[in-house]
Image (tube, rainbow, N blue to C red):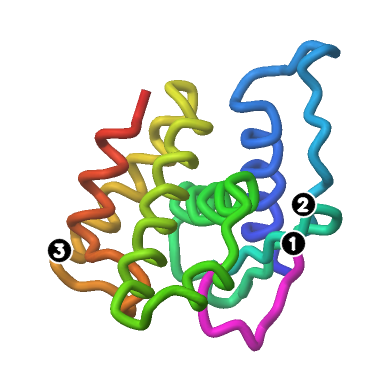
């Protein structure tokens, strides 16, 4: 793993585990540790796998290097949000075929929003990196499961504290 990717992952994990501030002893999280595992075969930048005992985020360090550190930190915050929200693909895949994509897109927007809220004021630059990235995409999107960039950028702005 390159030094840049390691720094981004370490920074994102520290920021998100505390919401950007040092936790008091009574506020320490009781949720399981989210493992982050490099996977060069991953076709996406990062993917979260929710499991109540051993959640994991797989990331592709080569793909991560294509983006600025703040945007990579947002991507990891987004995946962490999927885990916090207990998102799984199973619920969408059990839905009517005509509703699957809209259910999956709603989960993506919810994870974007949670990530922006968790990053908060202290790390608004990280969220703004994602806003700019998605805004540049305009009406394009990566696949039918992800909303268009302009929709994601607008949602992020609406969710920022």
Measuring from the top left, give residue 109's x and y in whole percent: 36, 52
What crowding class fits label 1: few (fewer than 14 Cα within 10 Å), some (14-19), or many (20 or more)?
A: some
Q: From the image, which quarter does the N terminus lie in? A: bottom right
- Magenta segment boundaries in residue numbering: 37-46
Residue at (63, 33) in percent of width and height? 15
Q: Residue at x 29, y 57 (%)?
A: 133
Sequence-wise, the earlier of marks 3 and 2 is 2
Q: Which secondary structure lies at badge 2?
A: loop
Instruction: Look at the image and say whether residue 44 sits in the magenta stretch.
Output: yes
Q: Secondary structure at mark 3?
A: loop
Q: Which residue is mark 2?
A: 34
Q: Is residue 108 above or below residue 119?
A: below
Q: Which mark is residue 56?
A: 1
Instruction: Tell whether 60 sits left or right of 32.
Output: left
Where's residue 127, x and y in %?
39, 40
* Spatial separation of the CA atoms under disc 3 and disc 1: 30 Å
> Which image quadrant: the C terminus?
top left
Mark 2, other Cα within 10 Å: few <14 / some 14–19 / many ≥20: many
Q: Is residue 26 magenta?
A: no
The residue at 28%/64% (across/down) is 147
Magenta segment main secondary structure: loop
Q: Which mark is residue 119?
A: none
Identify the residue position indicated by label 3 in the image: 138
In space, the residues marked 2 and 1 are separated at their CA atoms by 5 Å
Q: Position of residue 33 (x, y in %)?
A: 82, 47
Question: Vertically, is 94 above or below 131?
Answer: below
* Total number of numbered discs in the rendering: 3
**Residue 5 relative to residue 151: left or right:** right
The residue drawn where x is 68% and y is 69% is 58
- First in residue order: circle 3 vs circle 1: 1
Q: Point out the frontmost of discs 3 and 2.
A: 2
Q: Nearer the viewer, residue 11 or 143?
A: 143
């Amino acid at each position: 793993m390159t030094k840049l990717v390691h720094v981004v992952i370490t920074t994102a994990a520290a920021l998100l585990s505390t919401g950007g501030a040092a936790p008091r002893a009574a506020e320490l999280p009781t949720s399981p540790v989210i493992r982050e595992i490099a996977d060069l075969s991953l076709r996406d930048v990062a993917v979260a796998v929710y499991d109540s005992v051993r959640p994991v985020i797989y990331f592709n360090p080569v793909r991560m290097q294509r983006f600025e550190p703040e945007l990579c930190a947002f991507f990891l915050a987004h995946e962490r949000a999927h885990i916090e929200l207990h998102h799984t693909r199973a619920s969408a895949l059990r839905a009517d075929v005509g509703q699957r994509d809209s259910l999956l897109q709603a989960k993506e927007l919810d994870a974007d929003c949670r990530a922006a809220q968790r990053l908060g004021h202290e790390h608004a630059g990280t969220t703004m990196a994602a806003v700019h990235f998605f805004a540049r995409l305009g009406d394009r999107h990566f696949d039918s499961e992800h909303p268009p960039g302009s929709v994601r950028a607008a949602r992020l702005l609406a969710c920022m504290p």
